[in-house]
Amino acid sequence: MKAKVYDMDDGTFSLYNEAGQVIEHDFDTSEEAIQWALENGYDDVDEAVKVCFRVFPEGDVIALFPDLPEHDGYITSYQHIGQHSAASPELINELPVATSEQYAELLKELESIGYVIGKVNP
């Protein structure tokens, strides 16, 4: 069985099944939620990641993953062209937030390559 762990707005973590229904909630850590899932018959557990979609002045959209560190203080990023790269976390505050229309295609691309997207533009 599959389950997904999501970081909730109140700082707790919740488990959802494939149908999008809450299995269990109010975990203090994602590790605690994953452990519970594995102990209760869920053999495929994915952790959702936070993503901040931002837009460059020329219109290109970038996905920034603040919780996926790279090297030397950089974070993981993704764009249509160039795909994965390290990026400065300062881009989250420096660039305007992309609208849902602007990032829709990039979100689809991320999900198609296996990302489980949790919070968007936190």
Image (tube, rainbow, N blue to C red):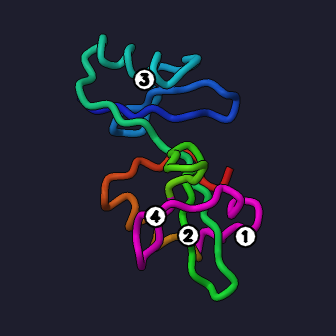
Verify CB contact (< 8 Å) between mark 2 and mark 1.
Answer: yes
Residue found 61% across the figure and 33% down from its top: 8
Q: In terms of sequence position, does the residue under pointer 2 or pointer 3 come before the other?
A: 3
Q: CA distance from mark 1 to mark 4?
A: 17 Å
Q: Identify the amino acid type marked 4.
A: Ser
Verify CB contact (< 8 Å) between mark 4 and mark 2.
Answer: no
- Give the labeled residue for mark 3: 23
* Label 3 environment density (alpha carbons within 10 Å; few <14, some 14–19, many ≥20): few
**In front of the other: label 2 or label 3?**
2
Q: Secondary structure at mark 2?
A: strand
Q: In terms of sequence position, does the residue under pointer 4 or pointer 2 come before the other?
A: 2
Q: In terms of sequence position, does the residue under pointer 1 or pointer 4 come before the other?
A: 4
Q: Which residues are magenta?
A: 77-101
Q: Which mark is residue 62?
A: 2
Left or right placement of residue 110 versus residue 93 in this view: left
Q: CA distance from mark 3 to mark 1?
A: 37 Å
**In front of the other: label 4 or label 2?**
4
Q: Is residue 60 above or below residue 75?
A: below
Q: Which mark is residue 17?
A: none
Verify CB contact (< 8 Å) between mark 3 and mark 1.
Answer: no
Q: Identify the amino acid type marked 1.
A: Leu
Q: In terms of sequence position, does the residue under pointer 2 or pointer 1 come before the other?
A: 2
Residue found 32% across the figure and 31% down from its top: 45
**In front of the other: label 3 or label 1?**
1
Q: For residue 58, which quarter of the picture?
A: bottom right
Q: Secondary structure at mark 3?
A: strand
Residue found 37% across the figure and 58% down from its top: 111
Q: In terms of sequence position, does the residue under pointer 3 or pointer 1 come before the other?
A: 3
Q: CA distance from mark 4 to mark 2?
A: 10 Å
Q: Residue furthest front?
A: 72
- Give the labeled residue for mark 4: 85
Closer-to-camera residue (121/62): 62
